[in-house]
């Protein structure tokens, strides 16, 4: 009998003793080792094991009580069930959460390789060598102030009193590198990269190294830029950052709470250029931390969100699905309140473009590599943004780093102003996306 089956059996027995008929439990355990170095010495070493269990109990009035614990032994589960039962007397009556209709549906088959964990000393040794190689790669690179090499294993499970039982284990390794420069008479410049894989052996450390060096060097020769309207090309990371910042556009809970750019009637409306299609696909082969079920036990899937510019689906939990006469989509997290969040974006071409654009021939185009200060520069309820960015002014293939500038606009206008979606998508930690060309955006320089 597995650990999850043991927990299920214990929970069923204790619930019966307490007179509880309806309950569910979601839990996760994370084992992580991470290291950082600085100037040839270990800077930080962390090794942790974290576990959490959320227990929900419904009383005879269908009110729900929620509690959390880290103790999955008999006494801990019994106490959590008892506490949640007592809390249910104060639970909401209107729109109370319920079991997902798909909590017992078959899970998708996903091949996931589990990595073998290394001791921290091996990770430190690897990262120290990488730091030394970065410092020797170019005379202008003076330090690697931010870096990290980490391994993580995650176990998750969901069970309920109706017989649902899910469990899975995932592992992944990640590396982050960020360099800064020092040159006489010039401002410090920087560049960074992040890579993730299922195992340390498959982690593209060399690719992360090369990308960091190339980006850093590309920013050495910089110039100011005049304020004005420019044609803009978003890198995959930059566009996905904006897409995530305005996720209330397709989040059903935000829509019901009237904290969204959309309304329930927005489905079927043209909100973007026909060139753009977006789906949320937790099972995409590029998603190394793919999850097969959400916090309510609903299987994850490939969910179209925008098809050729048309909004076709919202992200749903069991609660929002019931209120909007839809089906849960596998995007829920349970707790004191059920929340909804995207899993893994897949951005791709909708309609085929009638005009092709290329950075090798384009003139005076802004290529935005990374947007910053999303927490402060985004007004998600109004749809507006004003964000500092790292990028280049591109003229017929020649790139000149932009000293300092911000990009501003309205996200819905950006979606409608897309003039080209490149064919090849790039795999990133948050999704797969090609470069996206925008007709015009306001750029404020120095």
Image (cartoon, helix red, strand yellow):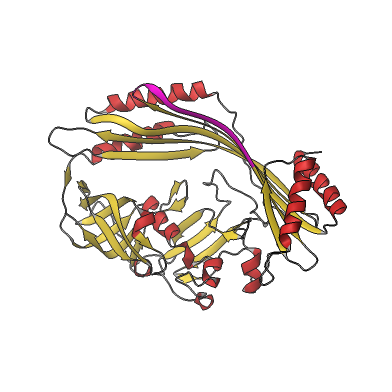
What secondary structure characterizes most of the magenta part? strand
The answer to whether 440 appears left or right of 156 in the picture is left
Residue 171 pos. (x, y %): 59, 37
Give the quadrant of the N terminus: top right
Whether residue 409 is in magenta: the answer is: no
Q: Is residue 432 visible?
A: yes
Up the image or down, 148 lies above or below 240; here it is above
Q: In which quadrant is the C terminus drawn?
A: bottom left
Seen from the viewer's position, the closer of residues 11 and 184 is: 11
Q: Is residue 16 above or below residue 192?
A: below
Q: Nearer the viewer, residue 322 or 215?
A: 322
Quadrant of the image occupied by residue 104: bottom right
Residue 86, given in percent of the width and then of the height, sits at 75, 58
Picture coordinates of residue 199, whole percent (x, y): 55, 33
Q: Which residues are magenta?
A: 39-51
Asked if residue 46 lies in the magenta stretch, the reply is yes
Give the residue at x 22% y 62%: 230
Instruction: Give the residue at the far bottom of this rendering.
Output: 265
């Amino acid at each position: 009998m597995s650990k999850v089956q043991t927990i299920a059996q214990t929970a069923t027995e204790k619930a019966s003793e307490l007179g509880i008929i309806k309950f569910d439990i979601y839990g996760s355990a994370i084992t992580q080792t991470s290291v950082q170095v600085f100037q040839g010495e270990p800077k930080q070493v962390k090794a942790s094991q974290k576990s959490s269990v959320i227990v929900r109990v419904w009383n005879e009035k269908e009110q729900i009580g929620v509690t959390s614990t880290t103790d999955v032994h008999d006494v801990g589960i019994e106490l959590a069930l008892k506490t949640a039962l007592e809390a249910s007397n104060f639970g909401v009556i209107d729109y109370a959460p319920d079991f997902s209709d798909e909590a017992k549906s078959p899970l998708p088959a996903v091949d996931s390789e589990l990595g073998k964990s290394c001791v921290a000393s091996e990770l430190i040794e690897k990262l120290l060598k990488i730091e030394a190689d970065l410092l020797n790669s170019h005379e202008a690179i003076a330090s690697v102030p931010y870096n990290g090499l980490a391994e993580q294993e995650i176990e998750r499970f969901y069970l309920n009193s109706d017989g649902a039982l899910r469990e899975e284990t995932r592992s992944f390794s990640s590396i982050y590198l960020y360099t800064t420069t020092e040159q006489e008479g010039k401002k410090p410049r920087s560049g960074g990269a992040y890579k993730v894989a299922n195992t340390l052996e498959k982690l593209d450390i060399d690719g992360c190294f090369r990308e960091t060096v190339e980006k850093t060097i590309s920013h050495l020769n910089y110039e100011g830029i005049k304020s004005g309207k420019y044609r803009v090309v978003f890198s995959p990371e930059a566009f996905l950052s904006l897409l995530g910042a305005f996720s209330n556009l397709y989040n059903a809970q935000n829509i019901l709470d009237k904290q969204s750019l959309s309304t329930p009637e927005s489905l079927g409306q043209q909100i973007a250029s026909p060139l753009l299609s977006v789906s949320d696909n937790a099972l995409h082969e590029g998603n190394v931390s793919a999850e097969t079920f959400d916090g309510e036990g609903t299987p994850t899937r490939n969910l179209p969100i925008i098809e050729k510019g048309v909004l076709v689906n919202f992200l749903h939990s069991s609660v929002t699905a019931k209120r909007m006469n839809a089906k849960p989509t596998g995007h829920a997290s349970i707790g004191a309140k059920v929340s909804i969040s995207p899993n893994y974006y897949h951005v791709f071409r909708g309609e085929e473009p009638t005009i092709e654009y290329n950075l090798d021939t384009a003139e005076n185009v802004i290529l935005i590599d990374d947007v910053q200060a999303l927490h402060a520069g985004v007004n998600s309820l109004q749809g507006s943004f004003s964000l500092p960015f790292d990028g280049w002014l591109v003229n017929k293939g020649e790139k000149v780093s932009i000293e300092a500038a911000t990009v501003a606009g309205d996200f819905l206008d950006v979606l409608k102003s897309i003039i080209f979606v490149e064919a090849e998508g790039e795999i990133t930690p948050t999704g797969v996306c090609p470069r996206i060309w925008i007709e015009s955006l306001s750029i404020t320089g120095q």
